[in-house]
Amino acid sequence: MIIIVTESANAATTIARALSVSSTAVADVYAGKKYAVLTIPKGFITPYGVSATTGPDSLPCVPERYAYGIHLSSIDGKREVAPEDQAFADYLAEFFAGAEEVVFASDGGADAQGRFQTICRFFKVGCKTSRMWLTRLEPKSVRHAFKPREYGRCSPPQFSSSSLSAHS
Protein backbone atom coordinates (compact mmCIF):
# COMPACT_ATOMS: atom_id res chain seq x y z
CA MET A 1 0.00 0.00 0.00
CA ILE A 2 1.17 3.53 -0.75
CA ILE A 3 0.72 5.91 2.17
CA ILE A 4 0.20 9.59 1.38
CA VAL A 5 0.80 11.95 4.31
CA THR A 6 -0.49 15.50 4.34
CA GLU A 7 -0.81 18.20 7.01
CA SER A 8 -4.18 19.52 5.86
CA ALA A 9 -7.62 17.91 5.99
CA ASN A 10 -8.62 19.74 2.78
CA ALA A 11 -5.59 18.34 0.96
CA ALA A 12 -6.35 14.83 2.25
CA THR A 13 -9.93 15.02 1.01
CA THR A 14 -8.86 16.26 -2.44
CA ILE A 15 -6.11 13.62 -2.77
CA ALA A 16 -8.51 10.87 -1.69
CA ARG A 17 -11.04 11.96 -4.32
CA ALA A 18 -8.40 12.25 -7.05
CA LEU A 19 -7.05 8.73 -6.35
CA SER A 20 -10.54 7.20 -5.78
CA VAL A 21 -9.96 6.38 -2.11
CA SER A 22 -13.36 6.55 -0.51
CA SER A 23 -13.55 4.70 2.79
CA THR A 24 -12.85 6.56 6.00
CA ALA A 25 -12.92 4.93 9.42
CA VAL A 26 -11.38 7.85 11.33
CA ALA A 27 -11.75 11.54 10.55
CA ASP A 28 -9.25 12.72 7.91
CA VAL A 29 -7.88 9.19 7.30
CA TYR A 30 -8.87 7.63 3.97
CA ALA A 31 -7.93 4.03 3.23
CA GLY A 32 -8.42 1.91 0.13
CA LYS A 33 -6.80 -1.19 -1.33
CA LYS A 34 -3.88 0.60 -3.05
CA TYR A 35 -3.64 3.91 -1.20
CA ALA A 36 -4.13 5.42 2.24
CA VAL A 37 -4.30 9.19 2.71
CA LEU A 38 -3.44 10.33 6.24
CA THR A 39 -3.73 13.78 7.78
CA ILE A 40 -1.08 14.36 10.43
CA PRO A 41 -1.38 17.93 11.77
CA LYS A 42 1.75 20.09 11.93
CA GLY A 43 2.24 19.89 15.68
CA PHE A 44 1.33 16.23 16.22
CA ILE A 45 4.94 14.93 16.21
CA THR A 46 7.18 17.59 17.72
CA PRO A 47 10.74 17.97 18.95
CA TYR A 48 10.89 18.03 22.73
CA GLY A 49 14.07 20.05 23.07
CA VAL A 50 16.76 19.84 25.74
CA SER A 51 14.36 20.50 28.61
CA ALA A 52 12.45 17.28 27.84
CA THR A 53 14.73 15.21 30.04
CA THR A 54 15.48 16.68 33.45
CA GLY A 55 17.13 15.24 36.51
CA PRO A 56 20.41 13.56 37.33
CA ASP A 57 20.38 11.43 34.15
CA SER A 58 19.79 14.33 31.76
CA LEU A 59 22.41 15.15 29.16
CA PRO A 60 23.34 18.51 27.68
CA CYS A 61 22.56 16.93 24.29
CA VAL A 62 19.37 14.89 23.92
CA PRO A 63 19.84 11.58 22.05
CA GLU A 64 17.83 11.40 18.82
CA ARG A 65 15.42 8.76 20.11
CA TYR A 66 14.29 11.16 22.85
CA ALA A 67 14.34 14.35 20.81
CA TYR A 68 10.83 14.11 19.31
CA GLY A 69 7.49 12.46 19.94
CA ILE A 70 3.76 12.98 20.15
CA HIS A 71 3.03 16.49 21.36
CA LEU A 72 2.60 16.86 25.09
CA SER A 73 -0.61 18.18 26.61
CA SER A 74 -1.14 19.53 30.09
CA ILE A 75 -3.15 16.88 31.97
CA ASP A 76 -3.75 17.44 35.70
CA GLY A 77 -0.83 19.85 35.84
CA LYS A 78 1.58 17.39 34.19
CA ARG A 79 2.84 17.49 30.62
CA GLU A 80 2.12 14.12 29.06
CA VAL A 81 0.69 12.50 25.95
CA ALA A 82 -3.10 12.62 25.83
CA PRO A 83 -4.72 9.15 25.56
CA GLU A 84 -6.60 10.09 22.36
CA ASP A 85 -3.35 11.25 20.75
CA GLN A 86 -1.62 8.00 21.69
CA ALA A 87 -4.56 6.01 20.26
CA PHE A 88 -4.38 8.01 17.00
CA ALA A 89 -0.60 7.43 16.76
CA ASP A 90 -1.10 3.69 17.33
CA TYR A 91 -3.76 3.66 14.59
CA LEU A 92 -1.43 5.46 12.15
CA ALA A 93 1.46 3.11 13.03
CA GLU A 94 -0.52 0.20 11.55
CA PHE A 95 -0.58 1.97 8.18
CA PHE A 96 3.14 2.78 8.26
CA ALA A 97 4.04 -0.79 9.24
CA GLY A 98 2.57 -2.22 6.02
CA ALA A 99 3.61 0.55 3.63
CA GLU A 100 5.58 -0.09 0.46
CA GLU A 101 6.06 3.67 -0.09
CA VAL A 102 5.34 6.79 1.97
CA VAL A 103 4.61 9.97 0.01
CA PHE A 104 4.59 13.44 1.54
CA ALA A 105 2.06 15.70 -0.19
CA SER A 106 2.61 19.38 0.49
CA ASP A 107 3.42 22.74 -0.99
CA GLY A 108 5.64 23.60 1.98
CA GLY A 109 9.37 24.08 1.85
CA ALA A 110 12.23 22.80 3.96
CA ASP A 111 10.35 23.13 7.26
CA ALA A 112 7.55 20.88 5.97
CA GLN A 113 10.11 18.39 4.65
CA GLY A 114 11.78 18.39 8.07
CA ARG A 115 8.46 17.60 9.75
CA PHE A 116 7.95 14.72 7.29
CA GLN A 117 11.39 13.31 8.13
CA THR A 118 10.52 13.53 11.83
CA ILE A 119 7.26 11.66 11.19
CA CYS A 120 9.18 8.97 9.28
CA ARG A 121 11.70 8.58 12.12
CA PHE A 122 8.95 8.45 14.75
CA PHE A 123 6.98 5.74 12.92
CA LYS A 124 10.23 3.93 11.92
CA VAL A 125 9.45 3.99 8.19
CA GLY A 126 11.72 1.49 6.44
CA CYS A 127 10.33 1.73 2.91
CA LYS A 128 11.11 4.31 0.23
CA THR A 129 9.84 7.84 0.72
CA SER A 130 8.92 10.41 -1.88
CA ARG A 131 7.60 13.96 -2.20
CA MET A 132 4.51 15.07 -4.09
CA TRP A 133 4.38 18.83 -4.72
CA LEU A 134 0.84 20.18 -4.46
CA THR A 135 0.40 23.33 -6.49
CA ARG A 136 -3.42 23.39 -6.51
CA LEU A 137 -6.06 21.38 -4.69
CA GLU A 138 -7.86 20.14 -7.78
CA PRO A 139 -8.18 16.42 -8.64
CA LYS A 140 -6.48 16.86 -12.03
CA SER A 141 -3.53 18.72 -10.48
CA VAL A 142 -3.21 16.09 -7.74
CA ARG A 143 -3.14 13.22 -10.25
CA HIS A 144 -0.58 15.14 -12.32
CA ALA A 145 1.63 15.70 -9.22
CA PHE A 146 1.34 12.08 -8.06
CA LYS A 147 2.79 10.44 -11.18
CA PRO A 148 6.24 12.13 -11.27
CA ARG A 149 6.73 12.32 -7.49
CA GLU A 150 10.33 12.75 -6.36
CA TYR A 151 12.12 9.94 -4.54
CA GLY A 152 14.38 10.80 -1.62
CA ARG A 153 17.42 12.91 -2.35
CA CYS A 154 18.18 11.49 -5.80
CA SER A 155 19.43 14.12 -8.21
CA PRO A 156 18.19 14.11 -11.80
CA PRO A 157 20.53 12.42 -14.29
CA GLN A 158 21.45 15.72 -15.96
CA PHE A 159 23.04 16.86 -12.65
CA SER A 160 24.90 13.69 -11.73
CA SER A 161 28.65 13.91 -11.18
CA SER A 162 29.42 11.64 -14.15
CA SER A 163 27.49 13.87 -16.58
CA LEU A 164 29.14 17.01 -15.18
CA SER A 165 32.66 15.61 -15.51
CA ALA A 166 31.95 14.59 -19.13
CA HIS A 167 31.21 18.24 -20.01
CA SER A 168 34.35 19.65 -18.36
Image: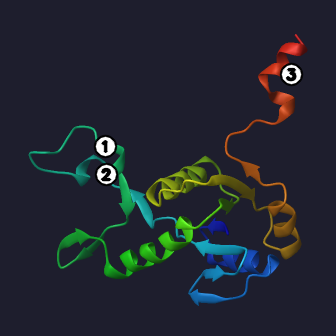
Q: Quadrant of the C terminus?
A: top right
Q: What percent of the width, then of the height, locates residue 46?
A: 41, 59
Q: Which residue is mark 3?
A: 163
Q: Which residue is mark 1?
A: 63
The crowd level at tag 2 (other Cα within 10 Å; few <14, some 14-19, many 20+) is few
Q: Is residue 90 above or below residue 64?
A: below
- For this rendering, which residue is in front, 91 or 15? 91
Residue at the spot 65% in from the left edge and 53% down from the top edge? 129
* Mark 1 and mark 2 residues within 8 Å of each other at the beta carbon: yes
Q: Mark 2 belongs to which amino acid?
A: Tyr
Mark 3 or 2 closer to N-term?
A: 2
Q: CA separation, marks 1 and 3?
A: 39 Å
Q: Is residue 13 above or below residue 107?
A: below
The crowd level at tag 3 (other Cα within 10 Å; few <14, some 14-19, many 20+) is few
The crowd level at tag 1 (other Cα within 10 Å; few <14, some 14-19, many 20+) is few
Q: Mark 3 belongs to which amino acid?
A: Ser
Q: What percent of the width, then of the height, locates residue 145?
A: 82, 61
Residue sticking out furthest to the left: 56
Residue at the spot 59% in from the left edge and 68% down from the top edge? 7
Residue at the spot 56% in from the left edge and 56% down from the top edge? 116
Mark 1 or 3 closer to N-term?
A: 1
- For this rendering, which residue is in front, 88 or 71? 88
Q: Mark 1 belongs to which amino acid?
A: Pro
* Direction from residue 8 to residue 67 in the image, left or right: left
* Direction from residue 23 to residue 65 in the image, left or right: left
Q: Which residue is mark 2?
A: 66
* Direction from residue 138 to residue 102 in the image, left or right: left
Coloring scheme used: rainbow
**SS at badge 2:** helix
Q: Quadrant of residue 1?
A: bottom right
Q: What percent of the width, then of the height, locates residue 44?
A: 45, 67
Q: CA separation, marks 1 and 2?
A: 6 Å
